[in-house]
Amino acid sequence: MSMRLNDDAMRQFRVAKVFQETDEHKLSLDFSMDGRRLLACDHAALSIFNCTRQAVLCQVHMHHYLPEVACFTQQDTRVLHSSSKHDYAIRCLDLEARSCVRLFSGHSKVAHRLVSQPGNDNVFISVGRDDQVYVWDFRASTHIYHLKQLVSPLCDFDPAGLVLATSTDTERIEIHDVRMLGEQPCQKFVYQVNDKAKWTQLQFAPNGKSMLLGTDHSWCFSVSAFDGTFQQSFSGYSNQQRQPLDASYTPDSQFILSGADEGRIHIWRAADGYPVAVLKGNNVGPVRCLRFNPKATLFVSSDLLLVFWMPMANGVYDWVDRLKPGETVSIKDEEDQKEDQPIQIHKPICMPKPKVDVYSLRKRLNSSSLAAKKRACSKSEDLTKTQNKEDLEDGEISDD
């Protein structure tokens, strides 16, 4: 069983636990594929948390690298992190060995976006402040693809790992087939330039049907992943410092969450943009980083503090069977389905008749002495040889 995320459930999220491992602002958050671990990155350290127990597993000091972003690989024992000190190489850190196992050099400025390809243990992309996008493979010594002629690019893989979306400034979005990255994009969506808001985030919905674009203004919006048409705008929150505040889908793609000033978190319906709730937790400044767990009903927000959010323990919730990956079911859909389909009454199942010679059994029960039993047995043998098939019960096979 799992909890259905509806309007009432989203309003009942409360702060479950608060951490402050360092005195630095968190720059990125990332969950492992199974949702059991959380990776928090700042200039001082990489912190790994257990999401089930909400406890710190380990911490790796990063004063020599000053990373801006970090993410899990497909293996939750290895993480990738950028470097802004000495060089701009991307490093792969083995958490069990506590050592760097691979170095990826190519960017002339620090990388600010790292994404692993879903369903592939070896491929990931990096986006740098040098406006370069590289596709890397752990099995290769250098990058395998280099996407050029992009301005302030953003990138993300779809949930199936089949396509790669890239953006250029606030002008266009390009969809690339991961099998043909060296060729022209298979789709290109061009938009009217908006100088009032700069795109800061590009994210596919968990169901792969839409894309969410965050801005450095007080709004974000979604577009169709199939034809690029505008879908919904999500606004009404404060971002006075024009920071790149994170927005996030819920795992069922039903709701959008976004950080805001003064530690607030705004929640909207993804389908119609209806504002559902405004949550206030322990964060004091702008909530720059925000991530919803892909497997559990919890999300994490951060500024200086790292805050775990969970539904209230004494809340009233709607429990449903756990959905398959990518499957979404709403309350309206189930009600319509119940109204359309007539109530089916199953017919009772008839039990099979016993495979016994009833006549012989009665003769045995009526006998009162051993001789009578013997005579009854002999008669039943003669009877069995001479009786017709009509005298046998259903399912019994004659010995003849």
Image (spheres, rainbow, N blue to C red):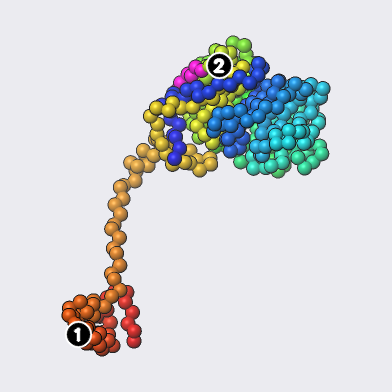
Coordinates of residue 349 in the picture (x, y in percent): 30, 60
Q: Residue at x 73, y 36 (%)?
A: 97
User: Badge 2 is on which residue?
Assistant: 283
Q: Residue at x 53, y 41 (%)?
A: 325
Q: In the rendered view, does 142 fall on the left or right side of 79?
A: right
Q: Element under label 2?
A: loop
**Magenta stretch in the rendered image:** 274-281
Near mark 2 (Cα within 10 A), the count class, few <14, some 14-19 or many ≥20, is many
Coordinates of residue 287 in the picture (x, y in percent): 58, 18
User: Badge 1 is on which residue?
Assistant: 372
Q: In the rendered view, does 267 fall on the left or right side of 183?
A: left
In the displayed orientation, state which residue is furthest to the front: 370
Q: Amino acid at mark 1?
A: Ala
- The one nearer the camera, 96 or 221, is 96
- The one nearer the camera, 179 or 28, is 28
Q: Eyeballing the image, is 38 above or below 321?
A: above
